Image (tube, rainbow, N blue to C red):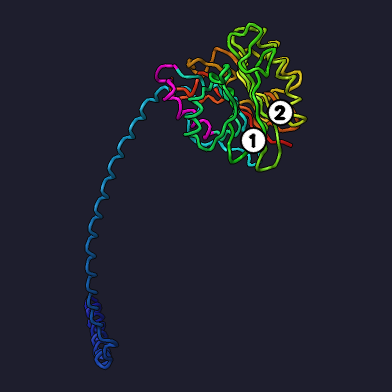
Amino acid sequence: MRKLPVIILLFALALYGQDAAQKAPEAAAKPQETVAKPAEAPKPAEAAKPAEAPKPAEAAKPAEAPKPQEAPKKAEPPKGPHFDTPVPKDPDSFRIASFNIRTRGDKAPNDWQARIPRILAILDKYELDSIGVQELTAQQKKVLLEKGTAFAAVGVGREPNKSGEHCCVVYRKDRFDCLDAGTFWLSTTPDVVGSHSWKTACRRICTWAKLKDKKTGKEFVHFNTHLDHRSEEARRNGAALIMSRMDDIAKGLPCFLTGDMNCRIATPSIQSFLAKMKNTKDVSETPHEGTFQTFHAYRYTDGKVTNGEIDFIFFNGDMRVLRHATINDHKGNEFPSDHFPVMAEIILK
């Protein structure tokens, strides 16, 4: 019974051997399907990019220099024009003025020799065409006309020999022709040279000039006076005399009256002028310029004048007053006169 498993085992081995012998030739007959592909050569590593050089640091901007501090402003001198810069005017107009230029005798810095160029500068800067001048002596007139060659003048002195103060009408020769002129004395005998009345402190006169405008052909009469500084009776009667003579002299022409009246606007003397004439300041088409006061006696502080408005330009007739001004030109305590001139710009219709 024990031999049976052995026989079975031998038989199984024989079968296994036979099967292996049959498969061996098949395996040899079949070539290998592919030859193993050679391994791909590794790709060469890319060359490392050189590191970028660091950008040079931007140069630091230099710090801005601190702005210099503004110097503290100095106190401004008294305001007002100072004898320069021409003041343009309408091409169809002319300028009339009243200017007490002050006689000789004052001390520096306002002595006569120092004031001559200042006066001439006023005439040129403002292009004044017809100027009623007070306190002008013959010697002063000679100097002004020699230096101010553009001007001519009419008028005589108030003393019996026609010396002393003149109330000249000074006018531009290239703008006007003088057709007639004269002087009368403010007295009960006005045609008597050197006469005086009414307790006047000084002899007083009125000079007039009939002028023809070369530009337009129009005519007018310019009267100029200097009323007494003490006697109210002399001022009142002198004003009445001027008004009574004006019509006879002008014969219907437009008139101007300039003057140092030595009194204020509300006084009887001024009111007698305003009964027949107008104040150029009151009808100016533009606001008055400068101070209202005109007599400063070389004292002009912070734009203030304490001595009042006593210089005027009155008119009658058909005309336009474009502007009115008190001319406050000065340099510190240097003045052209102890009065500021007064100016009106006019177009005759």
| Residue shown at the point (67%, 13%) measured from the top left | 187
Q: Position of residue 72 (x, y in %)?
A: 37, 25
Judged left or right of residue 124, residue 106 is left
Q: Amino acid at mark 2?
A: Cys
Given residues 206 and 332, the one toward you in this image is 206
Identify which residue is drawn at 68% across, 27% down.
256
* Cα distance in 3D space between marks 2 and 1: 14 Å
Looking at the rendered structure, the secondary structure element under dot 2 is: strand
Instruction: Examine the structure image and report whether residue 121 is included in the region drawn in magenta.
Output: yes
Between residue 270 and residue 74, name the one nearer to us: 270
Judged by depth in the image, the label closer to the viewer, 2 or 1, is 1
Tag of residue 255? 2
Residue range of the region highlighted in magenta in the rendering:
105-125
- Callout 2 crowding tier (Cα within 10 Å): few <14, some 14–19, many ≥20: many
Q: Quadrant of residue 346?
A: top right
Q: Dot 1 lies on which element?
A: strand
Q: Can the viewer see residue 269? A: no
Q: Which mark is residue 178?
A: 1
